[in-house]
Image: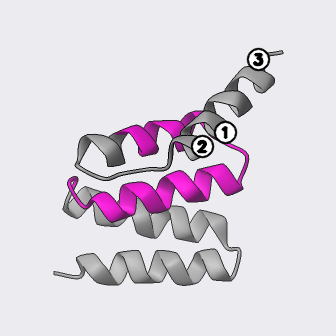
Amino acid sequence: EFLDGYKNIGDCYVQLQRWEEAETAYLQAIKINPEFKEVHLALSLLYSQREMPLQALQYADSFISLGGYLNENYLKGLKQKLTDEKK
């Protein structure tokens, strides 16, 4: 399987700030293995960087539900961005 490869490709695209390609690579990894929690985190961070707090929070939640741990401040920040966006 090329599972780790898709995550690594996504990480490279993030470094190059090629957001759409990174998103595509990460989503392909999740399509192959929906429980690849590190990719859920990577997508959360990607969406957060792109000022897409709803999507970032969704993937943060899925990361946590798969057994990952996130700093409480990260989650509070995403929720604050959502609140600010609705104003």
Query: Relative to residue 5, is residue 43 depicted above or below?
Result: above
Pointer 1 residue? 77
Element carrying mark 3: helix
Q: Which residue is mark 2?
A: 73
Q: Residue at x 61, y 34 (%)?
A: 76
Q: Please tell me how crowded label 3 is: few (under 14), some (14-19), or many (20+) other residues with Cα within 10 Å.
A: few
| Helix, strand or loop under label 1 | helix
Residue at numbered disc 3: 86
Badge 2 crowding class, 10 Å Cα cut-off, few under 14, some 14 to 19, many 20 or more, is: few
- Secondary structure found at label 2: helix
Quadrant location, the C terminus:
top right
Residue numbers of the magenta segment? 34-61
Asked whether the residues under the numbered discs 2 and 1 touch, taking CB atoms below 8 Å apart as contact, a structural biologist would say yes
The single residue placed furthest to the front in the displayed view is: 72
Q: Please tell me whether mark 1 or mark 3 is closer to you in this view.
A: 1
Q: Nearer the viewer, residue 18 or 38?
A: 38
